[in-house]
Amino acid sequence: MKISAEARRAVRWFVVAQTFFSLSFTISLDVRHMPYWNAFVPMLLGTASIWMVAYLQRRSAPRHGLRNMGIAMATWFALYTLMLDPALRLVGATSSWWWALAGIIAASPILARLSASSRG
């Protein structure tokens, strides 16, 4: 019981950290207008760090947890870079609120892992 609770807490930490990195990347690019590599490198380093920790602790992770999180990350990438970002640029959205909302919507598949990881 205690191990299960610790595993769920670790998964919640992982999901929240990955959501933070993803959302900060999108806000850095489109709200703060940072150069791409200045926003990408910190996200890449943070993501690589938490994925390494998760990979090393994979025995205590939920079944298919890393695979499902990888799918959520790929969905975030596709939603933001292939759909929301071009659409907002096409309509000429200039308000920071539109870009922040797009980042939150794109990060929602990652946050959806919180409810899935709390089961069982």
Image (cartoon, rainbow, N blue to C red):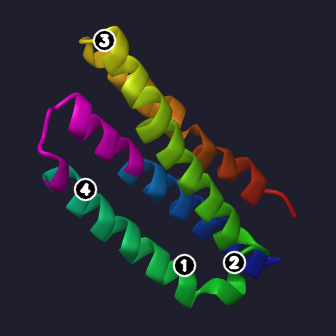
Verify CB contact (< 8 Å) between mark 2 and mark 1.
yes
3D distance between C-alphas at marks 4 and 3: 22 Å
Give, as a three-letter code, the residue at label 3: Ala
Q: Which residue is mark 3?
A: 93
Give, as a three-letter code, the residue at label 2: Ala
**Nearer-the-camera pick, 91 or 46:** 91
Query: The C terminus is located in which quarter?
Result: bottom right
3D distance between C-alphas at marks 3 and 1: 37 Å
Closer to the chain start, of discs 4 and 3, is: 4
**Nearer-the-camera pick, 120 or 82:** 82
Instruction: Count neighbours of disc 1 (C-alpha within 10 A) and say few if under 14, some if 14 to 19, many if 20 or more.
Output: some
Q: Which residue is mark 1?
A: 54
Image spot of residue 3 (x, y percent): 74, 81
Closer to the chain start, of discs 4 and 1, is: 4
Closer to the chain start, of discs 4 and 2, is: 4
3D distance between C-alphas at marks 3 and 2: 40 Å
Q: Which mark is residue 61?
A: 2
Closer to the chain start, of discs 3 and 2, is: 2
Verify CB contact (< 8 Å) between mark 3 and mark 2.
no
3D distance between C-alphas at marks 4 and 2: 27 Å
At x 83%, y 58%, the residue is 119
Main SS category, magenta section: helix
Q: Which residue is mark 4?
A: 40
Judging from the image, what secondary structure is the residue with disc 4 in?
A: helix
Circle count: 4
Considering only vertical position in the picture, is 92 above or below 24? Answer: above
The part of the image, by quadrant, that contains residue 94 is: top left
Segment colored magenta: 22-37
